[in-house]
Image (cartoon, grey):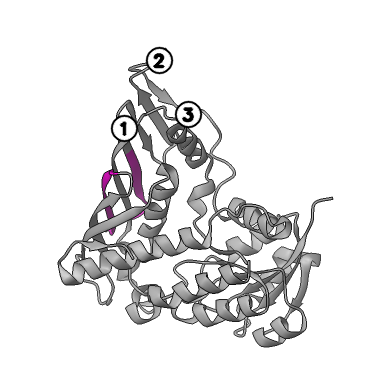
Amino acid sequence: MPESISVALITHAGGAHVGSYLSALASTEQCASVTLVDPDGRWNDDAKRVLGDKLHRVEPDLQKVLRDDPPGMALVTMEALLAPPVIDAALNAGCHVFAEKPACVRVEDFRPLVDKADRQHRYLMLAFANRLNPESIAARRIISTGKIGKLYGIEMHLVADQTRLTRPSYQQEWFCQKARGGGGHLIWLGIHWLDLAMHLTGSTIQSVAGFTANVGGQPIDVEDSAAAALRFDNGMLGTITSGYYLDRGYHSHIKIWGSQGWLHLEPMKDQPLTWSTTVGPDAGKVQTWEGSKSPRGYTPIVQSAVKACAEMTTPPVTAIESLRALSTVFAIYDSATSRRTLTVG
């Protein structure tokens, strides 16, 4: 039998993706039991319904749980402003931590958590679920095996709907308030593409030149639009467009060019991955990945995180990789304010 661990799902009424996390934990074999920590009681009934016998207890007092019954892993999904002290307490109790991004409103609040996790030999992982989508795994393999050669450039966009920003109820959410969420579209959605770009290419973003704006003019104090030029440590250059522009749905893609071909990732499409190489028997042909798009979403990355914590094997995302994505976002924000190209710290 595989090793298993207990998990504490730590959240509150404003926690993001809690329903998805409950479903993921319910289907994760190596999650032996779940303790729900929700001082607002918002998710109590949902947890009982989804988790069934796997729900070990419902306890609103986090310190009591960490003191009396510390779990093997804490899954933290909270308003960004509130997350750092909770993550810190979980690490102090000896827990591995898997957290909904951005988990901070300043990168300076996350960096010491990375240092503490490293000192205590605990995992600290942000929920970059797109890494484990099947087409992402296939794209990373194509790139790492040299099928498109030396990487030259990358172009990305992740565009969601402006419609949500017109709703007064959404405008009051922490996602729309800089002091509570750290920023807008870029830190909530665009960060996924920044992380995925580095994950796919095996290269980190070294410097950025960015712009942010509220182009839609809604009464929010975060950006609904961000654009940045990027320089990677392998010499590759790139761009990202991150914004709320549509009436509904998403437009998203990542295109990468290399010395021997190109690769195009469109996760929202029925055929999410195509590529072409200039060498070998398939030279000049546009090839289409024919694999299944399932499983995807939060379940695979939660399962991978729990397995890594239970067996002390490689996690789906490391603390350093999590920090790098956050550092890149905040460097873009600082670049937009200072109007200078900045090195990612």
Point out residue 66 in the picture as x, y percentages from the top left corner. Answer: 70, 81
Q: Residue furthest top?
A: 281
Q: Amino acid at mark 3?
A: Trp
Q: In the image, is residue 77 above or below residue 285? A: below
How far apart marks 2 and 1 lie (CA) works out to: 15 Å
Disc 2, SS:
loop
Residue 281 seen: yes
Where residue 270 sits, quadrant-wise, is top left
Question: For this view, does 267 lie left or right of residue 66?
Answer: left
Q: Which mark is residue 173?
A: none
Q: In the image, is residue 101 above or below residue 294? A: below
**Residue appearing at x 37%, y 54% in the figure:** 194
Point out residue 141 in the picture as x, y percentages from the top left corner. Answer: 49, 35
Magenta portion: prevailing SS class:
strand
Where residue 287 sits, quadrant-wise, is top left
Q: Name the residue nearer the viewer: 240 or 72.
A: 72
Q: Which mark is residue 280?
A: 2
Disc 3, SS:
loop
Q: Residues within 10 Å of mark 1 (few under 14, many from 20)?
A: many
Q: Which residues are magenta?
A: 235-255
Q: Which residue is mark 3?
A: 289
Marks counted in the figure total: 3
Q: Residues within 10 Å of mark 3 (few under 14, many from 20)?
A: few
Residue 15 seen: no
Q: Residues within 10 Å of mark 2 (few under 14, many from 20)?
A: few
Q: Which residue is mark 1?
A: 258
Point out residue 225 in the picture as x, y percentages from the top left corner. Answer: 25, 62
Sequence order check, earlier mark of 1 and 3 = 1
